[in-house]
Structures are given as C-alpha cells and as structure tokens.
Amino acid sequence: MADISAAMVKELRERTGAGMMDCKKALAETSGDLEAAVDALRKKGLAAAAKKAGRTTADGLIGMALEGSKGALVEVNSETDFVARNEAFQTLVGQITALSVAAGGDVEALRGATVPETGKSVADSISDAIGKIGENINLRRTAMVAVGSGVVAGYVHQQSAPGLGRMGVLVGLQSTGDAGALEAFGKQLAMHIAAANPQSVTVADLDPALVERERNIFAEQARASGKPENIIEKMVEGRLRKFYEESVLMEQTWVMDTDKKVKDALADAAEVADAEITIGGFVRMALGEGIVKEADDLAAEVAKLTT
C-alpha cells in the first residue's frame, strides 16, 4: 500500500473541495495516484470538476509585449506581493518583457538575452536584483503567439503598471481585414479568454484523452443513478455538450453579449473587418498557477528558535 502523506491529502482536498477523510480514502484506493484520486472523487460526486487545479499560490508579475503580428508573455516570480509592488522589481520585469518577443517563447533564450539598461544577461540582471531587493526572484516561463497576417492582441488583468499584472492573455487573429477592427475585437476576445479560461479553440483541438476521461466520468456518474444504458448514453452526450460549452472557446457564451456564442461574435467581427478571421492560437498565463507554496507555520518557526 502506498504511503499517503498529509501533504498529498491536503493537495487533493484543495483541488477538489472534498472532505479530508474522503481524500485520504481516495488516495489509498488509487495507491497515491493524485489524478486517479481526483477522478475517483468526481465519479462518486464528492468533488466539483477540478476547477481549483493550478490555483495561484506565488507572487510576482506577468508581463506582456505586443509587436503587430507577434506577442509574448513572461512570468517573473517573487516571494511576496510586497516585492511585486516594488518599483525596482517592476522595472526589471518590464526590461525582461521587452526582450520576450525576440526570444520566441524560449525561456532559456530569454535568460541569455542582454538587457540594454544593464549590459548584462537577463539571468545576471536577476541575480543583481536579488542582492538589491533581498528576495528570491525567478524567471519562470515565457510563451509566444504569432500569425502570418493579421494581429496579436492582448489583455493584462489586475494591471499594476503598463503591460504588467497578475494575468496576461494573448490571442492571434489571422486575417487580411482592417487592423483597427481586428485589434478592437482581439482585445475583447482576450478579455473573454481571461474570464472564461477555455482549453482549446475548437472541439477538434481538444486532447482526445481528455474527452475520453470526461466521457468515462460522466458515464460512471450516470450509472450510479441506476438509469438504463440507452438513457445513460443520452445523458453522457448531453453532459459532453455542456463540457464543450464550458471548455471550448468557439462554443463558449460570449461574455460581452450572453445571447451569442464566441463563434457568432467572430462572424460579426469579420463583417466589421471586411475579411474572414480565424483564431490562430491563444495563451492565458495566470500568476503562480501550478506552483504549490508552503504554508507558513509560525509555531514551528518559534519552536526552531527555542531548541
């Protein structure tokens, strides 16, 4: 039997909202496999659809750079929100962000790029900043969106300085239409993505393994209700449609007008731009997602000091 630690139970509880004993039992039944335990709890109706995964637990800033048909995002982490609001830290993140498009989404290339203001590499500039600010700083990741023709638009949520905030979204609009119309719609679409958090542009773009996983979970939930197989199949298809409406960008309800879907808003924008528009990709980057931050234990710290 796998050794189930308190940390594993805590993480499963945070991801699913299920009770502690239910989480411990699910981990025991799945030999400590966290993902399998999430599925087991969902099948039993003891967990919400894992929407708490990747919750923001680290501080710092997301930076966004736009250059016509290209755009890039970077995440630079600090230990505290206090440092994230520090002018020197914001200046550093701005300098790194300015180099991000040229790095093409390659974090190692970005670390090696030269910061004009310091004459040093990004990595060395970060090391210098750590010494001055007195807190650990890390360039965690970068991502890029580019289109052959058209625009890459973006949106920064909870902006603390121009192009810097706690979430950034880029969306590429492939089109030969009016650039101004494309940029206006692109910003609206980026705001929608920030709010709705889609997993793919179309149903066809979804990972087949993810779709099959959801199908199996829905089927197990339906069987638990005692319904016959022919009814179960209809229930599963209905729940899959709802899953698509929640997870697929083109099928989502348009946040700017809830009487429309995103695909309808895209068609309207194409008329305004006087050319067909296709979505060439998007990136949504939220600060600290996927990072597990150790909770402070004041009692333990005091105990260390007194022993």
Image (cartoon, rainbow, N blue to C red):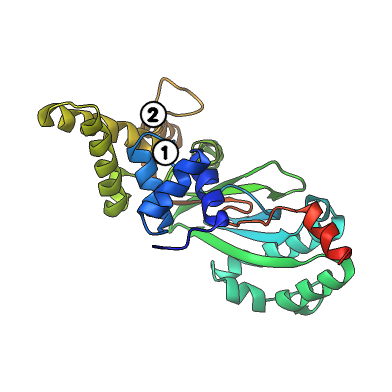
Q: Which residue is mark 2?
A: 261
Q: Amino acid at mark 2?
A: Lys
| Element assignment for label 2 | loop
Q: Rounded to the nearest whole Å, what is the CA distance between mark 1 and mark 2? A: 22 Å
Q: Quadrant of the N terminus?
A: bottom left
Residue 85 percent coordinates (x, y): 82, 50
Residue drawn at point x = 70 percent, y = 53 percent: 295
Q: Residues within 10 Å of mark 1 (few under 14, many from 20)?
A: some
| Residue 5 versus residue 105 in the image, above or below | above
Q: Residue 258, located in which quarter of the rendered image?
A: top left
* Apparent side of residue 213 relative to residue 65 in the rendered image (left or right): left
Marks 1 and 2 in Cβ contact (< 8 Å): no
> Which tag is nearer the camera, tag 1 or tag 2?
1
Q: Residue 114, located in which quarter of the rendered image?
A: bottom right
Let me know if residue 162 appears in the view: yes
| Residue 233 versus residue 296 in the image, above or below | above
Q: Residue 300, located in which quarter of the rendered image?
A: bottom right
Q: Earlier in the sequence, mark 1 or mark 2?
A: 1
| Residue 124 versus residue 89 in the image, above or below | below
| Element assignment for label 1 | loop
Let me know if residue 179 appears in the view: no
Residue drawn at point x = 25 percent, y = 42 percent: 215
Q: Which residue is mark 1?
A: 49
Residue drawn at point x = 46 percent, y = 45 percent: 23
* Apparent side of residue 297 relative to residue 52 in the rendered image (left or right): right
Q: Amino acid at mark 1?
A: Ala
Residue 162 percent coordinates (x, y): 74, 48
User: What number of labels is visible?
Assistant: 2
